[in-house]
Image (cartoon, rainbow, N blue to C red):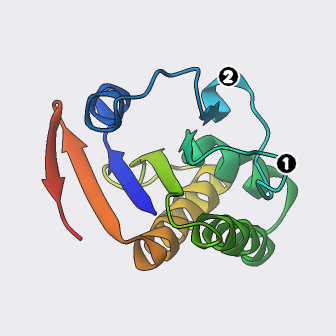
Amino acid sequence: MHFITGGAFNGKRAWVKKIYHVNRHDYWLSAYDNCPLPINFKDIDQDVIILEGVEFWLKDLTKKYDSKESRRIWNSCLENWHTWEKARVNRKLIVIGTDITKGIVPLEKENRVWRDVTGWAYQDIAAKSEKVDVIWYGLNQNIK
């Protein structure tokens, strides 16, 4: 698993396309295109899957559930995805999430919960990932 994060509009998508030589429409599941949170990939017969907009899926979870349940659901998905990836040697899961955890703490409780859950979820995915990159201004910094 490869986790890519960084600020909004900092070139994460372009960097992934360049590094992995993929077309956005080949294997791409994007919350930005209103794709629902994929629970598992059992019906997808691809070797590479790219998930984009993780922070939006997490926001949807925090609108419906408290932080504890949102994290439980997230970790269940993460475990399913990890199992899918490990089922075949050539499989690769690439996960892109915008970092919303820096800056001013939101005034609204629902936005603070979303920010907190996103921070915890990113820690969870970073722990499971073989590789983690932060993208700023189109440049990557490999941190794992």
Which residue occupies 42% across, 70% down? 129
Q: Nearer the viewer, residue 10 or 48?
A: 48
The amino acid sitting under disc 2 is Asp
- In the picture, which quadrant includes the C terminus? bottom left
Please, what secondary structure does the residue beneath circle 1 have?
loop
Relative to 73, 74 lies left or right: left
Q: Residues within 10 Å of mark 1 (few under 14, many from 20)?
A: few
Q: Residue 103: where, in percent of width, then height?
A: 31, 49
Give the Cα separation between the discs numbered 1 and 2: 20 Å
Q: Residue 20: where, in percent of width, then height?
A: 34, 37
Tell me, for residue 43, which label it has, or none. 1
Q: Which residue is mark 2?
A: 33
Which of the 4 image quadrants contains residue 14? Answer: top left
Number of numbered labels in the structure image: 2
Relative to 61, 84 lies left or right: left
Which of the 4 image quadrants contains residue 16? Answer: top left
Tell me, for residue 70, which label it has, or none. none
In this view of the protein, can residue 57 be seen by the observer?
yes
Q: Is residue 118 above or below residue 19?
A: below
Which residue occupies 63% across, 41% down? 56
Whichever of labels 1 and 2 marks the residue nearer the N terminus, that label is: 2
Most distant residue in the front direction: 89
The amino acid sitting under disc 1 is Asp
Which residue occupies 76% across, 54% down? 41
Which of the 4 image quadrants contains residue 68? Answer: bottom right
Q: Residue 33: where, in percent of width, then height?
A: 67, 22
In this view of the protein, can residue 104 be seen by the observer?
no
Q: Nearer the viewer, residue 19 or 116?
A: 19
Which mark is in front, 1 or 2?
Answer: 1
